[in-house]
Amino acid sequence: MNWFKKIIGRQDNKQTTAQDRDPNQSNAYDRIGGEKVIRALAKQFYRQMQTTPATQDLLSIHRAPIEESEQKLFEFLSGWLGGPQLYQQKYGHPALRARHMPFKVDEAMRDQWLLCMKAAIELEIKDPQHQHAIYSAISTLADHMRNQ
């Protein structure tokens, strides 16, 4: 996504092959720490959801085992942040809005999701500029998921 190119910049990555990466994507994946940080971000997101009293409605719509949802979030974020397109390789295009249609996603649900993501970003991504850029972009994406 070009929005990260402007905010975080580009950097060559010699560790992945052309088939693993979309050359039009940003390199936010690399700049924030790659797979290790993205995996920690997904794990922390679900930890926040499970431990924050204000997000229990959000937790209730996630089917068990939560580790499956965590893995899918990791795979999605990997590609979304400019890394390997793991989600697309397994499941095809994310089509996020369509995948979320069966659930009531109103402002309250969006806000619960963003509360968990903001906490995860702040805990797992070290650079404040990167935190801000990613949270800003993911907020726009979360708002797009609203269907009520």
Image (cartoon, helix red, strand yellow):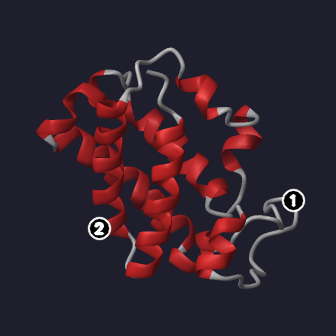
In front here: 105 or 26? 105
Which quadrant: the N terminus? bottom right
- As displayed, is residue 141 above or below residue 40? above
**Residue at 24% over, 48% down:** 48
Circles 1 and 2: CB distance less than 8 Å? Answer: no
In front here: 22 or 142? 142
**Residue at 59% over, 48% down:** 75
Residue 123: assigned label? 2
- As displayed, is residue 50 above or below residue 77? above
- Secondary structure, mark 1, is loop
In this figure, which residue is indicated by the disc labeled 1? 19
- Estimate the x, y position of residue 116 in percent, counting from the top left: 30, 48
Tell me how far mark 1 sits from mark 2, CA to CA: 31 Å
Mark 2: amino acid: Leu
- As displayed, is residue 130 above or below residue 122? below
**Residue at 47% over, 58% down:** 39
| Mark 1 residue crowding within 10 angstroms, few (<14) / some (14–19) / many (20+) | few
- Estimate the x, y position of residue 90 in percent, counting from the top left: 72, 37
| Mark 2 residue crowding within 10 angstroms, few (<14) / some (14–19) / many (20+) | some
**Residue at 38% over, 27% down:** 106
Where on the picture, by quarter, is residue 22? bottom right
